[in-house]
Amino acid sequence: MMRRQWQWAKLLIWFLAGLLAIHFISFSSTGLISSVFAQSTPPQPSPAIPQPQTSASNSSSPPASPIKPTSSSRVEDIAVIVYQKLPFLPLENQYRRQDTGQVDPEHTLVSRLIRYHQDIKKRATRYRLDWKLTLADYLGENEIIVTERYPGSITLQTNPMDSDVKAIRALNRLQRLELVDLLAQIYKPQVEKTTTEPTQKKQTQPAVVDPSKPSLSQPGDSQLLKF
């Protein structure tokens, strides 16, 4: 009887010891796993505080808006637009005035070209052909430029005609075409598109043709002669 009780007590001791061992193993493994994950997980960076951004427009002054020419625009203002668009053009504004003896920076090559075109030659400013004729004068292929009538010949101490002719002739063909296109575009009336739209929308009524009378030729009939 005593021997059987001792065996039961021995089994109970072993059972309790096993439970303690299981609890110890589980506790130690949980702590080990948590410590491993704590080491392997990288530290999360703290949220960065956004810094105020300064735009480039605040640091520097905005560029000047281009001048929009009107019917009352000065020739010197038109010349400013041309030099903004075509910076390869020489200024040629080193001449001194007769009345003050000071250099007039607004008396440029382009301003004298425009004055020669519209004041001396009385040519239209909105057509490319007229500007081509003016440049042909400078190239010596059209009309002769009269020295005494050239812009600046009276107001400046030195007549700039010879230097202006050399400057225009120094331009290549592409640069001269760019100058012609820009001048014609600047002086082109802004209302031209609005005035042509109503005429395009007009519907023409078909004309009643009397078979007993011969019909008159219409515009475009000459195109039928081309084969």
Image (cartoon, rainbow, N blue to C red):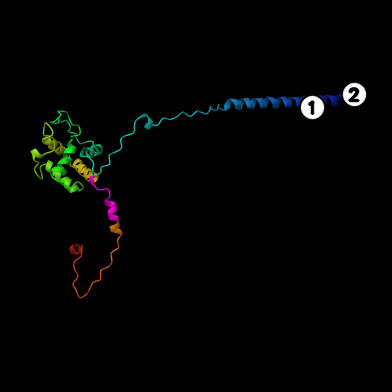
Front tag of 1 and 2: 1
Crowd tier of the residue under label 1, counting other residues whose Cα lies within 10 Å: few below 14, some 14–19, many 20 or above: few
Q: Quarter of the image holding residue 157? A: top left
Crowd tier of the residue under label 2, counting other residues whose Cα lies within 10 Å: few below 14, some 14–19, many 20 or above: few
Image x and y of residue 70, in percent: 25, 43
Q: Residue 186 versus residue 88: which sits nearer the camera?
A: 186
- Cα separation, mark 1 vs mark 2, equals 20 Å
Taken as a whole, is the magenta stretch helix, strand or loop? Answer: helix
- Which amino acid type is shown beneath numbered disc 1? Phe
Residue 12 in the figure: left or right of residue 177: right
Q: Which residue is mark 1?
A: 15
Image x and y of residue 10, in percent: 83, 24
Q: What range of the chain is rendered magenta?
A: 187-197
Look at the image and say whether residue 136 sits in the magenta stretch: no
Q: Which residue is mark 2?
A: 2
- Mark 1: secondary structure: helix
Image x and y of residue 176, in percent: 18, 42
